Image (cartoon, rainbow, N blue to C red):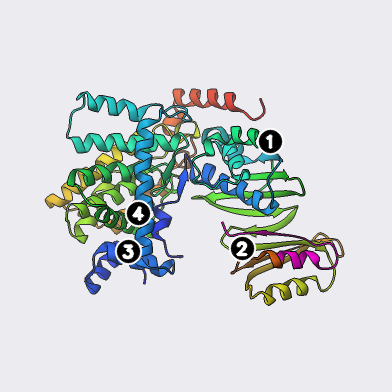
Amino acid sequence: MPQISAFDVVGPIMVGPSSSHTAGAVRLGLAARRILGEPVTHADIGLHGSFAATHWGHRTDVAILAGLLGMSMDDSRIPQAKELADAAGLQYAFQTVDLGDVHPNSVRMRVLGKENSIEVVGASVGGGRICIYEIDRFEVEIDGSYTVLLARYKDQPGVVADITRILASYGINIAFMKVSRKTRGSDALLVAETDDPIVDDVLELVRQLQGGIVARRLPRF
Amino acid sequence: MEITSAAQLLELCEKQQKSIPQIVAEYEAFLAITTPDAVRERMAEILRVMREAVAGGIDDQGEYAHLVKGYGQKVYQAKEKGRLVGGDVFNTAILYALAVAQHNASLGRIVACPTAGSCGVVPGAVLPVAEELQSSDEEIIDALLVMAGVGIVSASQGPISGAEGGCQAECGVASAMAAGAIVYLLGGSGETVFEAASLALQSHLGLVCDPIASLVEVPCVSRNATSAVTAITAANMAIAGIPGVIPYDEVVVAMKNIGRAMPESLRETSIGGLAGTPTGKRLYREMRTKYSLDN
Protein backbone atom coordinates (compact mmCIF):
# COMPACT_ATOMS: atom_id res chain seq x y z
CA MET A 1 0.00 0.00 0.00
CA PRO A 2 1.32 3.47 -0.83
CA GLN A 3 2.17 5.56 2.21
CA ILE A 4 -0.41 8.17 3.14
CA SER A 5 0.79 11.78 3.05
CA ALA A 6 -0.35 14.33 5.63
CA PHE A 7 -1.72 16.36 2.72
CA ASP A 8 -3.72 13.42 1.42
CA VAL A 9 -5.85 13.74 4.55
CA VAL A 10 -5.45 17.50 5.07
CA GLY A 11 -6.26 18.91 1.68
CA PRO A 12 -6.58 19.64 -1.12
CA ILE A 13 -7.33 23.33 -0.76
CA MET A 14 -10.26 23.58 -3.13
CA VAL A 15 -13.48 25.31 -4.00
CA GLY A 16 -16.45 23.18 -2.83
CA PRO A 17 -18.66 21.36 -2.64
CA SER A 18 -17.22 18.06 -3.85
CA SER A 19 -13.62 16.93 -4.36
CA SER A 20 -14.62 14.54 -7.13
CA HIS A 21 -17.50 16.44 -8.76
CA THR A 22 -16.13 19.98 -8.37
CA ALA A 23 -12.35 20.03 -7.73
CA GLY A 24 -11.66 17.09 -10.08
CA ALA A 25 -13.92 18.66 -12.71
CA VAL A 26 -11.94 21.92 -12.62
CA ARG A 27 -8.74 19.94 -13.15
CA LEU A 28 -10.25 18.06 -16.11
CA GLY A 29 -11.19 21.35 -17.79
CA LEU A 30 -7.76 22.80 -17.02
CA ALA A 31 -6.06 19.73 -18.50
CA ALA A 32 -8.03 20.16 -21.75
CA ARG A 33 -7.15 23.87 -21.84
CA ARG A 34 -3.47 23.10 -21.34
CA ILE A 35 -3.37 20.35 -23.95
CA LEU A 36 -5.04 22.72 -26.42
CA GLY A 37 -2.27 25.18 -25.62
CA GLU A 38 -4.26 28.35 -26.28
CA PRO A 39 -7.42 30.07 -24.99
CA VAL A 40 -10.59 28.08 -25.65
CA THR A 41 -13.13 29.80 -27.90
CA HIS A 42 -15.66 26.97 -28.28
CA ALA A 43 -16.39 24.03 -26.01
CA ASP A 44 -18.82 21.18 -26.49
CA ILE A 45 -18.99 19.31 -23.20
CA GLY A 46 -20.61 15.92 -22.78
CA LEU A 47 -21.27 14.78 -19.21
CA HIS A 48 -21.50 11.05 -18.56
CA GLY A 49 -22.94 8.97 -15.70
CA SER A 50 -22.73 10.48 -12.24
CA PHE A 51 -21.38 13.73 -13.75
CA ALA A 52 -24.56 14.02 -15.82
CA ALA A 53 -26.83 13.02 -12.94
CA THR A 54 -25.49 15.31 -10.22
CA HIS A 55 -23.72 18.11 -12.09
CA TRP A 56 -26.22 20.71 -10.93
CA GLY A 57 -25.76 19.89 -7.25
CA HIS A 58 -21.98 19.95 -7.34
CA ARG A 59 -21.69 22.57 -10.12
CA THR A 60 -19.69 20.19 -12.23
CA ASP A 61 -20.57 22.22 -15.32
CA VAL A 62 -19.38 25.48 -13.78
CA ALA A 63 -16.23 23.71 -12.55
CA ILE A 64 -15.32 22.33 -15.99
CA LEU A 65 -15.84 25.76 -17.54
CA ALA A 66 -13.61 27.31 -14.88
CA GLY A 67 -10.89 24.84 -15.79
CA LEU A 68 -11.31 25.56 -19.50
CA LEU A 69 -10.80 29.24 -18.63
CA GLY A 70 -7.48 28.30 -17.01
CA MET A 71 -8.48 28.31 -13.35
CA SER A 72 -7.07 25.90 -10.75
CA MET A 73 -9.26 24.03 -8.26
CA ASP A 74 -8.65 26.59 -5.49
CA ASP A 75 -9.54 29.66 -7.59
CA SER A 76 -12.20 31.69 -5.81
CA ARG A 77 -13.55 32.94 -9.18
CA ILE A 78 -14.90 29.45 -9.97
CA PRO A 79 -18.51 30.34 -9.03
CA GLN A 80 -18.50 33.08 -11.68
CA ALA A 81 -17.15 30.82 -14.45
CA LYS A 82 -20.23 31.11 -16.67
CA GLU A 83 -20.18 34.92 -16.53
CA LEU A 84 -16.42 34.96 -17.08
CA ALA A 85 -16.79 32.58 -20.05
CA ASP A 86 -19.33 34.94 -21.59
CA ALA A 87 -17.05 37.91 -20.99
CA ALA A 88 -14.11 36.05 -22.54
CA GLY A 89 -16.16 35.11 -25.60
CA LEU A 90 -16.01 31.40 -24.82
CA GLN A 91 -19.02 29.73 -26.41
CA TYR A 92 -20.05 26.54 -24.70
CA ALA A 93 -22.75 23.88 -24.69
CA PHE A 94 -23.39 21.04 -22.25
CA GLN A 95 -25.17 17.82 -22.99
CA THR A 96 -25.72 14.40 -21.45
CA VAL A 97 -23.75 11.66 -23.21
CA ASP A 98 -23.36 7.91 -22.82
CA LEU A 99 -19.67 7.10 -23.20
CA GLY A 100 -20.22 3.39 -22.55
CA ASP A 101 -18.55 1.30 -19.89
CA VAL A 102 -16.30 4.01 -18.43
CA HIS A 103 -15.77 5.65 -15.02
CA PRO A 104 -19.07 7.19 -13.81
CA ASN A 105 -17.48 10.63 -13.35
CA SER A 106 -16.47 11.01 -16.98
CA VAL A 107 -16.56 13.96 -19.36
CA ARG A 108 -15.87 14.39 -23.05
CA MET A 109 -14.61 17.84 -23.96
CA ARG A 110 -14.42 18.95 -27.58
CA VAL A 111 -12.58 22.25 -27.47
CA LEU A 112 -11.55 24.74 -30.10
CA GLY A 113 -9.13 27.61 -30.01
CA LYS A 114 -8.13 30.08 -32.76
CA GLU A 115 -5.46 27.67 -34.06
CA ASN A 116 -6.26 24.19 -32.84
CA SER A 117 -8.97 21.82 -31.77
CA ILE A 118 -8.85 18.76 -29.59
CA GLU A 119 -11.09 16.13 -28.05
CA VAL A 120 -10.25 15.06 -24.51
CA VAL A 121 -12.03 12.41 -22.47
CA GLY A 122 -11.27 11.94 -18.81
CA ALA A 123 -12.62 11.07 -15.41
CA SER A 124 -12.50 12.44 -11.89
CA VAL A 125 -11.46 9.46 -9.82
CA GLY A 126 -11.78 10.79 -6.25
CA GLY A 127 -10.23 13.30 -3.88
CA GLY A 128 -9.59 15.75 -6.72
CA ARG A 129 -7.48 13.24 -8.65
CA ILE A 130 -8.18 12.80 -12.35
CA CYS A 131 -7.29 10.58 -15.28
CA ILE A 132 -7.32 11.64 -18.93
CA TYR A 133 -7.97 8.44 -20.84
CA GLU A 134 -8.60 9.55 -24.41
CA ILE A 135 -7.17 12.30 -26.60
CA ASP A 136 -8.42 12.64 -30.17
CA ARG A 137 -9.76 9.06 -30.00
CA PHE A 138 -6.39 7.67 -28.92
CA GLU A 139 -6.25 5.78 -25.64
CA VAL A 140 -3.95 7.46 -23.11
CA GLU A 141 -3.49 7.43 -19.34
CA ILE A 142 -2.48 10.80 -17.94
CA ASP A 143 -3.01 11.80 -14.31
CA GLY A 144 -1.04 15.02 -14.15
CA SER A 145 1.80 13.71 -12.02
CA TYR A 146 4.30 14.06 -14.89
CA THR A 147 5.00 16.53 -17.67
CA VAL A 148 3.61 15.07 -20.88
CA LEU A 149 4.74 15.46 -24.48
CA LEU A 150 2.05 14.55 -26.99
CA ALA A 151 3.06 14.08 -30.63
CA ARG A 152 0.57 13.27 -33.35
CA TYR A 153 2.15 12.06 -36.60
CA LYS A 154 1.74 9.78 -39.58
CA ASP A 155 2.89 6.26 -38.67
CA GLN A 156 6.34 5.71 -40.19
CA PRO A 157 9.73 4.38 -39.11
CA GLY A 158 12.08 6.69 -37.22
CA VAL A 159 9.70 9.25 -35.72
CA VAL A 160 9.87 7.80 -32.22
CA ALA A 161 13.68 7.67 -32.40
CA ASP A 162 13.81 11.30 -33.59
CA ILE A 163 11.62 12.50 -30.78
CA THR A 164 13.42 10.58 -28.04
CA ARG A 165 16.74 11.85 -29.42
CA ILE A 166 15.54 15.44 -29.10
CA LEU A 167 14.40 14.80 -25.52
CA ALA A 168 17.72 13.13 -24.70
CA SER A 169 19.73 16.03 -26.13
CA TYR A 170 17.98 18.38 -23.70
CA GLY A 171 18.57 16.01 -20.79
CA ILE A 172 14.88 15.28 -20.42
CA ASN A 173 14.32 11.88 -18.84
CA ILE A 174 11.35 9.82 -20.05
CA ALA A 175 9.53 8.10 -17.18
CA PHE A 176 6.84 6.40 -19.28
CA MET A 177 6.12 6.30 -23.00
CA LYS A 178 3.33 4.91 -25.14
CA VAL A 179 2.93 4.81 -28.90
CA SER A 180 -0.35 3.94 -30.55
CA ARG A 181 -1.87 4.15 -34.01
CA LYS A 182 -5.23 3.59 -35.64
CA THR A 183 -3.89 1.27 -38.38
CA ARG A 184 -0.49 0.76 -40.02
CA GLY A 185 0.65 3.87 -41.84
CA SER A 186 -2.23 5.97 -40.48
CA ASP A 187 -2.45 8.51 -37.65
CA ALA A 188 -0.28 7.73 -34.65
CA LEU A 189 0.15 9.27 -31.22
CA LEU A 190 3.19 9.27 -28.99
CA VAL A 191 2.71 10.08 -25.31
CA ALA A 192 5.88 10.60 -23.30
CA GLU A 193 5.68 11.34 -19.57
CA THR A 194 8.87 13.00 -18.43
CA ASP A 195 10.61 13.82 -15.16
CA ASP A 196 11.70 17.22 -16.47
CA PRO A 197 9.72 20.09 -18.02
CA ILE A 198 9.40 20.21 -21.81
CA VAL A 199 11.03 23.50 -22.83
CA ASP A 200 9.85 25.58 -25.81
CA ASP A 201 12.86 24.59 -27.94
CA VAL A 202 12.03 20.89 -27.63
CA LEU A 203 8.47 21.47 -28.73
CA GLU A 204 9.72 23.53 -31.68
CA LEU A 205 12.29 20.90 -32.75
CA VAL A 206 9.68 18.13 -32.63
CA ARG A 207 7.36 20.26 -34.75
CA GLN A 208 10.13 20.75 -37.33
CA LEU A 209 10.60 17.00 -37.85
CA GLN A 210 9.55 15.56 -41.22
CA GLY A 211 5.93 14.55 -41.69
CA GLY A 212 3.86 17.36 -40.19
CA ILE A 213 4.01 16.43 -36.53
CA VAL A 214 1.49 18.09 -34.24
CA ALA A 215 3.26 18.38 -30.90
CA ARG A 216 1.72 19.54 -27.63
CA ARG A 217 2.79 19.52 -24.04
CA LEU A 218 0.96 19.28 -20.78
CA PRO A 219 2.84 20.52 -17.71
CA ARG A 220 2.41 18.69 -14.40
CA PHE A 221 -0.76 19.80 -12.68
CA MET B 1 10.17 5.97 7.87
CA GLU B 2 6.65 4.67 8.06
CA ILE B 3 3.48 5.66 9.91
CA THR B 4 0.58 3.26 9.42
CA SER B 5 -0.90 2.96 12.92
CA ALA B 6 -1.27 4.91 16.14
CA ALA B 7 0.82 2.27 17.90
CA GLN B 8 3.62 2.78 15.38
CA LEU B 9 3.46 6.59 15.60
CA LEU B 10 3.60 6.52 19.41
CA GLU B 11 6.48 4.04 19.32
CA LEU B 12 8.43 6.38 16.98
CA CYS B 13 7.83 9.27 19.41
CA GLU B 14 9.00 7.13 22.33
CA LYS B 15 12.11 5.79 20.57
CA GLN B 16 13.26 9.12 19.19
CA GLN B 17 12.08 11.14 22.20
CA LYS B 18 10.15 13.48 19.92
CA SER B 19 6.62 14.90 19.93
CA ILE B 20 3.89 13.81 17.47
CA PRO B 21 4.16 17.08 15.47
CA GLN B 22 7.92 16.64 15.13
CA ILE B 23 7.57 13.06 13.91
CA VAL B 24 4.71 13.88 11.50
CA ALA B 25 6.64 16.83 10.01
CA GLU B 26 9.73 14.62 9.55
CA TYR B 27 7.66 11.80 8.03
CA GLU B 28 6.00 14.19 5.57
CA ALA B 29 9.34 15.79 4.69
CA PHE B 30 10.69 12.29 4.00
CA LEU B 31 7.70 11.38 1.79
CA ALA B 32 7.64 14.64 -0.16
CA ILE B 33 11.43 14.97 -0.32
CA THR B 34 11.40 18.31 1.42
CA THR B 35 12.19 19.79 4.85
CA PRO B 36 10.12 19.75 8.06
CA ASP B 37 10.07 23.56 7.87
CA ALA B 38 8.53 23.44 4.40
CA VAL B 39 5.90 21.04 5.74
CA ARG B 40 5.10 23.51 8.53
CA GLU B 41 4.83 26.33 6.00
CA ARG B 42 2.32 24.32 4.03
CA MET B 43 0.38 23.68 7.23
CA ALA B 44 0.42 27.45 7.86
CA GLU B 45 -1.26 27.91 4.45
CA ILE B 46 -3.86 25.28 5.47
CA LEU B 47 -4.52 27.29 8.65
CA ARG B 48 -4.93 30.52 6.64
CA VAL B 49 -7.49 28.92 4.31
CA MET B 50 -9.38 27.44 7.27
CA ARG B 51 -9.66 30.87 8.88
CA GLU B 52 -10.74 32.49 5.61
CA ALA B 53 -13.40 29.81 5.18
CA VAL B 54 -14.77 30.51 8.68
CA ALA B 55 -14.99 34.24 7.91
CA GLY B 56 -16.40 33.56 4.44
CA GLY B 57 -19.12 31.26 5.74
CA ILE B 58 -20.23 33.74 8.40
CA ASP B 59 -20.32 36.61 5.89
CA ASP B 60 -21.88 34.95 2.87
CA GLN B 61 -25.49 33.85 2.75
CA GLY B 62 -24.82 30.59 0.94
CA GLU B 63 -25.65 32.20 -2.40
CA TYR B 64 -24.72 29.15 -4.45
CA ALA B 65 -26.01 26.54 -2.01
CA HIS B 66 -29.38 24.93 -2.68
CA LEU B 67 -30.72 24.20 0.80
CA VAL B 68 -28.31 25.56 3.41
CA LYS B 69 -28.52 29.32 3.24
CA GLY B 70 -27.47 31.77 5.91
CA TYR B 71 -26.71 29.10 8.52
CA GLY B 72 -23.52 30.88 9.62
CA GLN B 73 -25.33 34.21 10.01
CA LYS B 74 -28.24 32.63 11.91
CA VAL B 75 -25.99 31.10 14.57
CA TYR B 76 -23.84 34.24 14.70
CA GLN B 77 -26.89 36.43 15.38
CA ALA B 78 -28.40 34.03 17.93
CA LYS B 79 -25.07 33.77 19.71
CA GLU B 80 -24.57 37.56 19.75
CA LYS B 81 -28.04 38.00 21.26
CA GLY B 82 -27.24 35.47 23.99
CA ARG B 83 -30.03 33.14 22.93
CA LEU B 84 -27.91 29.95 22.97
CA VAL B 85 -27.10 27.79 25.98
CA GLY B 86 -23.69 26.25 26.63
CA GLY B 87 -20.25 27.80 26.86
CA ASP B 88 -18.69 30.10 24.34
CA VAL B 89 -16.26 27.48 22.98
CA PHE B 90 -19.09 25.07 22.16
CA ASN B 91 -21.24 27.66 20.46
CA THR B 92 -18.28 29.05 18.54
CA ALA B 93 -17.55 25.48 17.41
CA ILE B 94 -21.11 25.16 16.13
CA LEU B 95 -20.79 28.52 14.37
CA TYR B 96 -17.40 27.84 12.77
CA ALA B 97 -18.23 24.30 11.66
CA LEU B 98 -21.52 25.38 10.07
CA ALA B 99 -19.88 28.40 8.46
CA VAL B 100 -17.12 26.36 6.81
CA ALA B 101 -19.44 23.56 5.69
CA GLN B 102 -21.90 26.08 4.26
CA HIS B 103 -19.05 27.90 2.53
CA ASN B 104 -18.15 24.58 0.89
CA ALA B 105 -21.75 24.02 -0.23
CA SER B 106 -21.74 27.51 -1.69
CA LEU B 107 -18.62 27.11 -3.84
CA GLY B 108 -16.32 28.67 -1.28
CA ARG B 109 -12.64 27.82 -0.86
CA ILE B 110 -12.03 25.24 1.88
CA VAL B 111 -9.54 22.61 3.00
CA ALA B 112 -10.83 19.06 2.49
CA CYS B 113 -10.17 17.52 5.92
CA PRO B 114 -10.23 14.63 5.37
CA THR B 115 -12.94 15.31 2.76
CA ALA B 116 -14.80 18.34 1.42
CA GLY B 117 -18.03 17.03 2.94
CA SER B 118 -16.47 17.04 6.41
CA CYS B 119 -14.38 20.20 5.94
CA GLY B 120 -16.05 22.12 8.79
CA VAL B 121 -15.24 19.69 11.61
CA VAL B 122 -11.55 20.40 12.22
CA PRO B 123 -11.66 24.22 11.91
CA GLY B 124 -14.95 24.17 13.83
CA ALA B 125 -13.53 22.24 16.77
CA VAL B 126 -9.90 23.34 16.85
CA LEU B 127 -10.00 27.09 16.14
CA PRO B 128 -12.42 28.05 18.96
CA VAL B 129 -10.31 26.07 21.44
CA ALA B 130 -7.12 27.74 20.17
CA GLU B 131 -8.78 31.16 20.51
CA GLU B 132 -9.92 30.37 24.06
CA LEU B 133 -6.40 29.22 24.99
CA GLN B 134 -4.83 32.13 23.07
CA SER B 135 -2.56 29.64 21.31
CA SER B 136 0.09 31.04 18.98
CA ASP B 137 0.01 30.15 15.28
CA GLU B 138 3.06 27.93 15.82
CA GLU B 139 1.14 26.01 18.49
CA ILE B 140 -1.87 25.68 16.21
CA ILE B 141 0.36 24.41 13.39
CA ASP B 142 1.73 21.79 15.80
CA ALA B 143 -1.85 20.82 16.67
CA LEU B 144 -2.70 20.57 12.95
CA LEU B 145 0.29 18.24 12.50
CA VAL B 146 -1.10 16.07 15.33
CA MET B 147 -4.47 16.18 13.55
CA ALA B 148 -2.75 15.09 10.32
CA GLY B 149 -1.06 12.26 12.22
CA VAL B 150 -4.44 10.96 13.37
CA GLY B 151 -5.64 11.29 9.76
CA ILE B 152 -2.65 9.37 8.38
CA VAL B 153 -3.17 6.41 10.71
CA SER B 154 -6.91 6.47 9.97
CA ALA B 155 -6.48 6.46 6.19
CA SER B 156 -3.81 3.75 6.47
CA GLN B 157 -6.22 1.35 8.14
CA GLY B 158 -9.70 2.31 7.03
CA PRO B 159 -11.79 4.27 4.54
CA ILE B 160 -12.08 8.06 4.52
CA SER B 161 -14.88 8.38 1.98
CA GLY B 162 -18.63 8.19 2.43
CA ALA B 163 -18.88 5.92 -0.59
CA GLU B 164 -16.76 3.30 1.16
CA GLY B 165 -17.52 3.79 4.83
CA GLY B 166 -20.50 6.10 5.24
CA CYS B 167 -20.41 9.35 7.22
CA GLN B 168 -18.46 7.68 10.05
CA ALA B 169 -15.50 7.61 7.63
CA GLU B 170 -15.81 11.34 6.86
CA CYS B 171 -17.26 13.27 9.82
CA GLY B 172 -16.23 10.48 12.21
CA VAL B 173 -12.58 10.50 11.17
CA ALA B 174 -12.62 14.33 11.03
CA SER B 175 -13.93 14.39 14.61
CA ALA B 176 -11.18 11.99 15.75
CA MET B 177 -8.54 14.15 14.02
CA ALA B 178 -9.92 17.29 15.68
CA ALA B 179 -10.11 15.62 19.10
CA GLY B 180 -6.43 14.70 18.85
CA ALA B 181 -5.47 18.27 17.96
CA ILE B 182 -7.44 19.67 20.90
CA VAL B 183 -5.79 17.29 23.37
CA TYR B 184 -2.43 18.50 22.07
CA LEU B 185 -3.45 22.15 22.58
CA LEU B 186 -4.52 21.27 26.12
CA GLY B 187 -1.10 19.80 26.84
CA GLY B 188 -2.14 16.14 26.80
CA SER B 189 0.28 13.30 26.01
CA GLY B 190 0.53 11.39 22.74
CA GLU B 191 -1.37 8.50 24.35
CA THR B 192 -4.14 10.89 25.40
CA VAL B 193 -4.37 12.20 21.81
CA PHE B 194 -5.38 8.74 20.67
CA GLU B 195 -7.69 8.11 23.65
CA ALA B 196 -9.60 11.21 22.51
CA ALA B 197 -9.51 10.09 18.87
CA SER B 198 -10.87 6.71 19.93
CA LEU B 199 -13.70 8.28 21.96
CA ALA B 200 -14.62 10.64 19.10
CA LEU B 201 -14.72 7.95 16.42
CA GLN B 202 -16.63 5.59 18.72
CA SER B 203 -19.41 8.18 18.89
CA HIS B 204 -19.74 8.09 15.09
CA LEU B 205 -19.74 4.34 14.45
CA GLY B 206 -22.61 3.28 12.24
CA LEU B 207 -23.28 6.77 10.92
CA VAL B 208 -24.47 6.44 7.32
CA CYS B 209 -23.94 8.77 4.35
CA ASP B 210 -27.41 9.65 3.08
CA PRO B 211 -27.29 13.13 1.55
CA ILE B 212 -30.47 14.54 0.11
CA ALA B 213 -30.50 14.93 -3.66
CA SER B 214 -26.80 14.07 -4.01
CA LEU B 215 -25.93 17.45 -2.49
CA VAL B 216 -23.31 18.04 0.19
CA GLU B 217 -25.84 19.98 2.27
CA VAL B 218 -28.47 18.07 4.27
CA PRO B 219 -27.59 16.47 6.64
CA CYS B 220 -23.87 17.05 5.93
CA VAL B 221 -23.63 20.69 7.02
CA SER B 222 -25.35 20.27 10.40
CA ARG B 223 -23.43 17.03 11.02
CA ASN B 224 -20.20 18.99 10.69
CA ALA B 225 -21.33 21.02 13.71
CA THR B 226 -22.31 18.01 15.84
CA SER B 227 -19.07 16.23 14.94
CA ALA B 228 -17.05 19.30 15.93
CA VAL B 229 -18.80 19.45 19.31
CA THR B 230 -18.24 15.69 19.74
CA ALA B 231 -14.52 16.26 19.15
CA ILE B 232 -14.36 18.80 22.00
CA THR B 233 -16.39 16.48 24.25
CA ALA B 234 -14.06 13.55 23.47
CA ALA B 235 -10.95 15.69 24.10
CA ASN B 236 -12.33 16.88 27.45
CA MET B 237 -13.14 13.31 28.47
CA ALA B 238 -9.67 12.10 27.52
CA ILE B 239 -7.94 14.97 29.36
CA ALA B 240 -10.01 14.13 32.43
CA GLY B 241 -8.68 10.59 32.25
CA ILE B 242 -11.61 8.76 30.63
CA PRO B 243 -10.07 6.00 28.49
CA GLY B 244 -11.20 5.00 25.02
CA VAL B 245 -10.81 1.40 26.23
CA ILE B 246 -10.62 0.13 22.63
CA PRO B 247 -7.34 1.35 21.06
CA TYR B 248 -7.79 3.81 18.17
CA ASP B 249 -6.30 1.42 15.61
CA GLU B 250 -8.94 -1.16 16.51
CA VAL B 251 -11.75 1.40 16.39
CA VAL B 252 -10.68 2.32 12.84
CA VAL B 253 -10.84 -1.33 11.79
CA ALA B 254 -14.26 -1.67 13.45
CA MET B 255 -15.35 1.42 11.49
CA LYS B 256 -14.08 -0.17 8.26
CA ASN B 257 -15.95 -3.40 8.96
CA ILE B 258 -19.14 -1.54 9.80
CA GLY B 259 -18.75 0.34 6.51
CA ARG B 260 -18.47 -2.94 4.63
CA ALA B 261 -21.61 -4.21 6.33
CA MET B 262 -23.53 -1.07 5.31
CA PRO B 263 -25.79 -1.49 2.29
CA GLU B 264 -24.76 0.55 -0.73
CA SER B 265 -27.98 2.57 -0.41
CA LEU B 266 -26.47 4.17 2.71
CA ARG B 267 -23.06 4.95 1.26
CA GLU B 268 -23.26 8.25 -0.63
CA THR B 269 -25.71 7.00 -3.25
CA SER B 270 -28.58 9.25 -2.13
CA ILE B 271 -30.94 6.26 -2.22
CA GLY B 272 -31.58 5.27 1.40
CA GLY B 273 -31.78 7.01 4.76
CA LEU B 274 -32.80 10.68 4.69
CA ALA B 275 -32.40 10.77 0.90
CA GLY B 276 -35.05 8.03 0.63
CA THR B 277 -37.69 9.81 2.73
CA PRO B 278 -40.73 11.27 0.95
CA THR B 279 -39.39 14.80 1.49
CA GLY B 280 -35.88 13.83 0.43
CA LYS B 281 -37.19 12.29 -2.77
CA ARG B 282 -39.45 15.25 -3.51
CA LEU B 283 -36.57 17.72 -3.12
CA TYR B 284 -34.46 15.59 -5.44
CA ARG B 285 -37.18 15.43 -8.12
CA GLU B 286 -37.76 19.17 -7.96
CA MET B 287 -34.09 20.05 -8.34
CA ARG B 288 -33.35 17.44 -10.98
CA THR B 289 -36.15 18.79 -13.15
CA LYS B 290 -35.14 22.39 -12.57
CA TYR B 291 -31.52 21.84 -13.53
CA SER B 292 -31.75 19.14 -16.23
CA LEU B 293 -29.24 19.59 -19.07
CA ASP B 294 -31.89 18.46 -21.50
CA ASN B 295 -34.40 21.21 -20.62
Q: Is residue A12 above or below residue B40?
A: above
Dot 2 lies on which element?
A: strand
Q: Quadrant of the C terminus of chain B?
A: top right
Residue located 38% across and 63% down the image: B38
- Specify which label sits upstream in the sequence, 3 or 4: 3
Dot 4 lies on which element?
A: helix
Q: Verify whether residue A213 appears in magenta.
A: yes
Mark 3 near mark 1, Cβ–Cβ under 8 Å? no
Q: CA distance from mark 3 to mark 4?
A: 15 Å
Crowd around label 3: few <14 · some 14–19 · many ≥20 (10 Å): many
Q: Nearer the viewer, mark 3 or mark 4?
A: 4
Residue located 81% across and 74% down the image: A158
Q: Are marks 1 and 4 on the same chain?
A: no
Q: Which residue is mark 4?
A: B44
Give the amino acid at mark 3: Val
The disc placed on residue B234 is none
Residue B26 is situated, as x and y percent measured from the top left of the image, at 34, 68
Q: Nearer the viewer, mark 4 or mark 2?
A: 4
State the extent of the magenta-drawn residues as a range: A203-221
Dot 1 lies on which element?
A: loop
Q: Which residue is mark 3?
A: B24
Give the amino acid at mark 2: Thr
Q: CA distance from mark 2 to mark 3?
A: 29 Å
Q: Are marks 4 and 2 on the same chain?
A: no
Q: Which residue is mark 2?
A: A147
Q: Quadrant of residue B42?
A: bottom left
Q: Which residue is mark 1?
A: A89
